Amino acid sequence: MVTISGNAYAFVFDGNTDRLEGARIGIAELPGIETTAGPNGAYSLEVPDDTSLTPFAEAEGYYPTHLQTFHSRGRDLEQVNFQMPRLDIYRALAAVAGAELDPDTGLLAHSAVVSTFFEVGGRNLADFDAFHDFRPHGVADSTAAITPAAREPIYFNADVIPEQGLECSSRDGGVLWTDLPPGVYEIDGSNPETGHAGFVATCEPGRLVNAGPPWGLYELAAGEAPDPSVRP
């Protein structure tokens, strides 16, 4: 067995810096293994080793959020954080990005995947409050590719808004895809000056996959290889 741990907190927008104490945390592939986030949104779960793991979180007033799919490989997974959008923010961002919504539920009709080209300096901040306050935290001028091929990525501008037509990341570092059919996707990043890790997203109708910092498309240090747990 290994441990997966981190914090659940609000997508930082419009001054919302809430930590989501009381959020329900679980693993999509392992029904029955779940916990409730405590103070500061902190959680910890014991999970089997050598297993594919897609953590998810649910909190009142926020869009249910899944993370990237990991594969446990003999060591604990730390700082596996949930960055969750408030429902009104989700609706606004979905409208800007042109995502199709289910008219009956108001949820995504398909799936959306979000990640951040996260600056390497933020990955060494073990204290959650220091990590949370590390922003802007994105690597500019990075691009992302998704396999199998799907819609073109939409990059977030420096004001943390998805902007159609941008060809690469801003200092915010955000990137997203909307209206993805069900399936397993591999996402990779590139930059002329630095390297990025990739990740795997498991998509289902209505699912928001936010492969957020310090995982997802994180910046690699010089000579560093991506963590092996990011490739199931």
Image (tube, grey):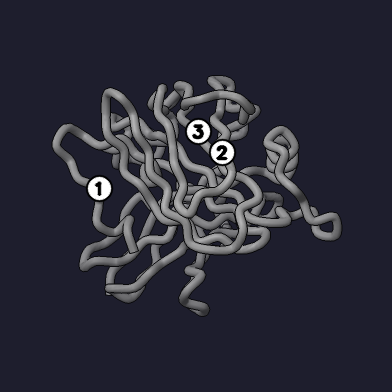
198 and 12: which is toward the camera: 198
Mark drawn on residue 143: none
Label 2 or label 3, whichever comes before in sequence order: 2
Residue 14 locus on image (x, y percent): 65, 28
Question: Few, some or many C-alpha atoms within 10 Å of disc 1 (few <14, some 14-19, many ≥20)?
Answer: some
Q: Residue furthest front?
A: 149
Q: Measure how far apart labels 2 and 3 are at the Cα level.
A: 14 Å
Q: Are marks 3 and 1 in contact (CB under 8 Å)?
A: no
**Three-letter residue code for mark 3:** Gly
Q: Residue at x 60, y 25 (%)?
A: 165
The foreground one among 59 and 226 is 226
Q: Indicate which disc, 1 or 2, sits on the residue closer to the N terminus.
A: 2
Q: Amino acid at mark 2?
A: Glu
Check disc 2 and report the residue beneath it. Answer: 152
Residue underneath mark 3: 174
Q: Give residue 226's mark.
A: 1
Instruction: Confirm or deny contact between disc 1 and disc 2 (CB under 8 A).
Output: no
| Residue 57 placement (x, y as % from top left) | 55, 59
* Amino acid found under the numbered disc labelled 1: Pro
Residue at image x 56%, y 60%? Answer: 203
- Residue depth check, mark 1 versus mark 2: number of the one nearer the observer: 2
State the image quarter where residue 109 is shown. bottom right
